[in-house]
């Protein structure tokens, strides 16, 4: 009898997620015989695709018009910087990279509190404590180096997000450049590269002297053009441009200050394009542009920790019985000893709150077929590519969102976690981290000798797919840790984009207190989380 029930369940799941036998992707990529001498991936932090046009971003717009524009693009969830930095660096989701949030909880680091991954000192300490397991799988730089290529990462972002791009550079794996490791002495790894940059370019602008981040972007581009391209000459470059992220957080999406800094970031990309022409490389290069996440406007703040303390589900702000790791518009909750009764009590409390969105707990089986969490009314962490063991949380929560436009006409509002009081939020400050379509949808553009021209792709893609595609273009063999999809349909002589089968499903879970929905899109065996929302719960 049990066997018959299981067979019926499998048949039901196959109906929900039918196999696509005539268009699937193997873990071992085809021999692509790339014609590119150089590949550059620009990560423009927080750049929403709606902000790209011929006036705001003339150089990025040119690449969009002449290359492949991915209209159905995805950031990795949680839609925050360091999660996506690690995901891009490994071509893997958090379940394999081990970077599950902008702040993470590891008892060996601190038994009662999470810590920020934005400071590379924290990351190096974690690497030491875990015997080299900062990242739980190989990075793109390691894979390229092992196969005889010269990778280089350069970033104007935080020292932590930069370090995650190539964490083995201090051991001689490729190059990593960031002017804010130790601005007076260390701006790059390894040492000979650091010394040469300080000699040739000079020290970066001091953070305390900056009124905005444009000066950091400008210094970073100088190093890219005058040292990396002109002298070091790597095969693959990952370049992280930290604006418009910082300005959008403060001034909002579409604000005059935001548009000015977007124009400056675009100008810097244009300077790199011009340098490639001067060096005779422009026609021999693939240029990829992505962003680590989208953005939305804050309209309500929730102090989740205080709410749990008031409900007597956490002893105090300093206690280690329940530890929160926030990512702005989503929060990871860790329960001591993974106490099942306590986890259930917290979930049931959260489900009764109007300020809660969709909740995720440990799953019952392999995603995406098994998408329900261990507690009624929750989804599985597995469907998010989030671990429920190790560094993973016991509970992951999101907040309500809407498509309401801000004062500048850009859609997307979100609740966010705060250390202050719970209540409505006014103004234009903005952020990310949620599973709204406005933060999930990022920018993705591919241009160059290996890619189709003047094409818009409706096929789902994520920023980790760019890293997988870069590795495939270099004919580097894959293993199971690489979870990104090779974007064959975007390549010259690739499949006709309109013939690529795409499945979209809206999944639901519910109990007496809450009904939640989650939409995924699927290409072959690869699935992408589009958005999730609480049914009947509006802002």
Image (cartoon, helix red, strand yellow):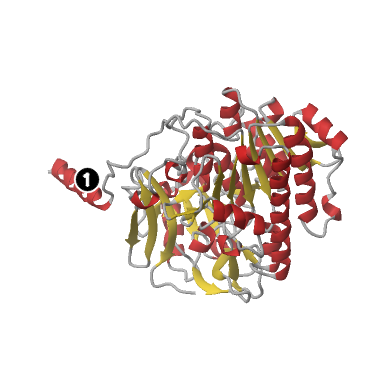
Q: Secondary structure at mark 1?
A: helix
Q: Is residue 107 visible?
A: yes
Between residues 457 and 201, which one lies in front from this camera angle? Answer: 457
**Is residue 45 positioned above or below 303 on the image?**
above
Judged left or right of residue 109, residue 361 is: left
Between residues 383 and 57, which one lies in front from this camera angle? Answer: 57
Residue at left offset 66%, top offset 74%: 427
**Is residue 187 positioned above or below 431 on the image?**
above
Residue at left offset 76%, top offset 35%: 230
Pointer 1 residue: 10
Q: Is residue 114 visible?
A: no
Among the 4 quarters of the image, the one containing residue 136: top right
Spot occupied by residue 43 in the image (x, y as percentages of width and height): 62, 48
Spot occupied by residue 496 in the image (x, y as percentages of width and height): 38, 47
Residue at left offset 68%, top offset 58%: 244
Among the 4 quarters of the image, the one containing residue 250: bottom right
Q: Which quarter shows the N terminus?
A: top left
Between residues 527 and 6, which one lies in front from this camera angle? Answer: 527
Spot occupied by residue 336 in the image (x, y as percentages of width and height): 52, 46
Judged left or right of residue 59, residue 79 is: left
Spot occupied by residue 31 in the image (x, y as percentages of width and height): 45, 29
Between residues 7 and 239, which one lies in front from this camera angle? Answer: 239
Q: How many marks?
A: 1
Crowd band around label 1 with a 10 angstrom C-alpha radius: few (<14), some (14–19), many (20+): few
């Amino acid at each position: 009898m049990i066997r018959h029930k299981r067979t019926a369940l499998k048949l039901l799941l196959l109906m929900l997620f039918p196999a696509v036998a005539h268009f699937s992707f193997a873990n071992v990529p085809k021999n692509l015989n790339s014609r590119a001498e150089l590949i550059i991936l620009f990560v423009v932090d927080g750049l929403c695709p709606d902000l790209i046009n011929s006036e705001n971003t003339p150089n990025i717009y040119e690449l969009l018009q002449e290359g492949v524009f991915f209209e159905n693009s995805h950031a990795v969830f949680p839609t925050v910087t360091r999660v996506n930095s690690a995901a891009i660096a490994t071509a893997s989701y958090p379940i394999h990279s081990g970077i599950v949030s902008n702040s993470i909880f590891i008892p060996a680091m601190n038994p009662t509190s999470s810590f920020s991954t934005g400071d590379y000192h924290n990351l190096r300490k974690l690497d030491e404590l875990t015997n080299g397991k900062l990242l739980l799988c190989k990075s793109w730089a390691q894979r390229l180096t092992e196969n005889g290529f010269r990778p280089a990462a350069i970033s104007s972002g935080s020292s932590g997000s930069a370090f995650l791009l190539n964490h083995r550079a201090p051991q001689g794996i490729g190059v990593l450049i960031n002017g804010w490791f130790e601005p007076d002495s260390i701006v790059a790894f390894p040492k000979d590269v650091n010394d040469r940059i300080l000699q040739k370019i000079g020290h970066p602008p001091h953070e305390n002297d900056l009124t905005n981040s444009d000066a950091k972007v400008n210094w970073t581009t100088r190093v890219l053009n005058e040292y990396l391209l002109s002298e070091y000459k790597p095969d693959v470059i990952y370049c992280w441009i930290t604006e418009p992220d910082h300005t959008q957080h403060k001034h909002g999406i579409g604000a005059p200050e935001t548009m000015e800094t977007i124009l400056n970031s675009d100008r810097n990309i244009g300077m790199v394009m011009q340098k490639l022409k001067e060096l005779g490389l422009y026609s021999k290069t693939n240029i990829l542009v992505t962003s680590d996440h989208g953005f939305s406007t804050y309209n309500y703040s929730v102090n989740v920790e205080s709410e749990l303390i008031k409900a007597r589900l956490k002893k105090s702000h300093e206690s280690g019985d329940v530890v929160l790791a926030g990512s702005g518009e989503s929060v990871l909750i860790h329960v001591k000893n993974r106490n099942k009764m306590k986890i259930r009590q917290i979930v049931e409390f959260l489900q009764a709150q109007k300020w809660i969105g969709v909740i995720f707990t440990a799953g019952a089986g392999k995603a995406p077929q098994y998408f329900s969490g261990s507690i009624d009314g929750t989804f599985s962490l597995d469907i998010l590519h989030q671990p429920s063991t190790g560094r993973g949380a016991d509970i992951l929560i999101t907040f309500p969102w809407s498509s309401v436009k801000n004062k500048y006409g850009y859609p997307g509002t979100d609740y966010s976690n705060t250390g202050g009081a719970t209540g409505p939020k006014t103004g234009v400050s903005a952020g990310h981290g949620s599973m709204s379509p406005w933060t999930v949808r990022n920018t993705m553009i591919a241009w160059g000798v290996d890619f189709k021209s003047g094409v818009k792709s409706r096929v789902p893609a994520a920023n980790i797919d760019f890293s997988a595609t870069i590795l495939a273009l270099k004919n580097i063999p894959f293993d199971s840790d690489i979870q990104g999809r090779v974007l064959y349909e975007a390549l010259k002589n690739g499949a006709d984009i309109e013939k690529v089968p795409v499945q979209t499903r809206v999944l639901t879970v519910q109990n007496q207190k809450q009904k939640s929905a989650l939409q995924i899109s699927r290409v072959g065996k690869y699935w992408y989380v589009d958005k999730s929302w609480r049914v009947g719960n509006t802002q």
